[in-house]
Amino acid sequence: GGGSAVTVHRAGAAVRSAGPLAFQFTGWVSLSPSSGPVTGGQAINVSGYGFDPSLGYACAFTNDGQAQGFPLTSDAAVVSGEVLVCAAPALSGHARNATLRVTSSQGSAGAGGDLVPFAGESAAFDYAEVVRGVFPSWGDKLGGARVTVVG
């Protein structure tokens, strides 16, 4: 990605450099979608800037209440300097609210590397039960019918 010109000031005076300097902004700003099924597999697009394809990235899912089943991590793929994609892992505990943080490895790929927080941002990700059907799918208009919800 491109950089931005940098001017260095020391005690109010500009400092000259031997050549041009560049500064790369990094970080992420949003994720979409912000929820997925407890069974996992939901593809999540993380939008931001400064994603370097030479580094490995992962999405780390945590729960501040240290709920059973957390932390969870999945590898993230660099689509461009502005987009990462990761898949939400399956949830094994009872908590449904998670915090997603992007982590990066310094030269080693993905979730197995030495991961560090990427620019410190986080966002909420909610796990939801998936309703697959209702049986029977009809009932009396006056109500009172018993139904079975399949999920």
Image (cartoon, rainbow, N blue to C red):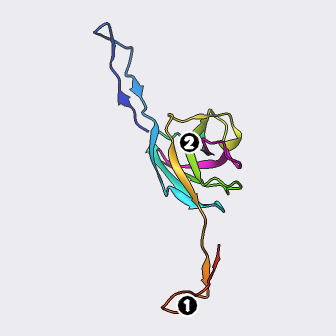
- Quick check: 43 left or right of 7? right
> Magenta segment, which residues?
60-81
N-terminal of the pair, mark 2 or mark 1, is: 2
- Quadrant where the C terminus sits is bottom right
Residue 138 marker:
1
* Of 146 and 130, the residue lying toward us: 146
**Residue 73 magenta:** yes
Name which residue lies at 31% across and 6% down. 11
Q: Residue 143: x percent and y percent? A: 52, 87
What distance separates the C-alpha of mark 2 from that of mark 1?
A: 45 Å
As displayed, is residue 37 above or below residue 7? Answer: below
Give the amino acid type for the residue marked by disc 2 in the picture. Val
> Does residue 145 appear anywhere in the picture?
yes
Name which residue lies at 71% across and 49% down. 69
As displayed, is residue 125 above or below residue 132? Answer: above
Q: Residue 13: x percent and y percent? A: 28, 8
Name which residue lies at 71% across and 48% down. 68
The residue labelled by disc 2 is 102
Quarter of the rendering containing residue 93 = bottom right
